[in-house]
Image (cartoon, coloured by chain):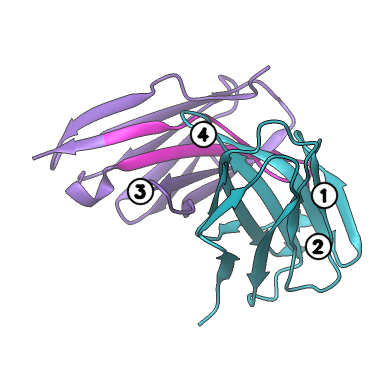
Chain colours: A cyan, B purple
Amino acid sequence: DGGITQSPKYLFRKEGQNVTLSCEQNLNHDAMYWYRQDPGQGLRLIYYSQIVNDFQKGDIAEGYSVSREKKESFPLTVTSAQKNPTAFYLCASSLVAGGLLKTQYFGPGTRLLVL
Amino acid sequence: DQQVKQNSPSLSVQEGRISILNCDYTNSMFDYFLWYKKYPAEGPTFLISISSIKDKNEDGRFTVFLNKSAKHLSLHIVPSQPGDSAVYFCAASSGGGADGLTFGKGTHLIIQP
């Protein structure tokens, strides 16, 4: 059963702590993305990666870091530098065929709360 | 500066009638547009997309219309069903789009019995 999995579903962070959100896909998609959603807002792009070992900053990358060591995995670390981390985090993936974007498919999301 | 705008935060439609959700964009470089449906605490589900070389795309009850000169697109749902109640996001990309999507803030569609 192909899809995108995110874990955990809920995550609590203490002040000054780094936390890592997991995203795995078995769709053989080339590109992976991290978005953040705040109440009443659309999704905003944090980071994206089109190929393994390469990634690019999105619109709101400050306070976040990523890695792409494997095609299937794109973990997101929320660092202590992110001053307002409470949000719903969504991972997505897509094929990039011939340099053209195909539809992005989303995981179920992780809700991060600061204690 | 919001490049994708959904000016109606909510829309109420009677079951069986047509639902029309609107989206405007400002970036003339956008060439691929998508609609997603989202329930609370879940990831968005892809509904339908349209390339800028077309002005209409249809999939079952869902039709997307694109007016490039007006930088406007709309999603029509006919007939509306109770399960259609959700938040609908319009999204756009440019230059092949592998560098991510730009989303609107969403429209909450409520289907009334």
Magenta-colored stretch includes residue B91: yes
Q: In this view of the protein, can residue B14 be seen by the observer?
A: yes
Pointer 2: what residue?
A: A98
Give the SS element for disc 2: loop
Pointer 4: what residue?
A: B66
Front residue of B36/B62: it is: B36
Q: In this view of the protein, can residue B18 be seen by the observer?
A: no
Residues tagged by mark 3 and mark 4 found on one chain of the structure: yes
- For image coordinates 63% across by 57% down, the residue present is A92
Front residue of A83/B45: it is: A83
- For image coordinates 38% across by 39% down, the residue present is B87
Which stretch is magenta? Answer: B86-109
Pointer 1: what residue?
A: A65
Residues tagged by mark 4 and mark 2 found on one chain of the structure: no
Magenta-colored stretch includes residue B100: yes
Q: What percent of the width, then of the height, locates residue A81? A: 80, 36
Alpha carbon distance from label 4 to label 2 = 24 Å
Q: Is residue A73 above or below residue A55?
A: below
Image quadrant occupied by the C terminus of chain A: top right
The residue marked by circle 1 belongs to what chain? A
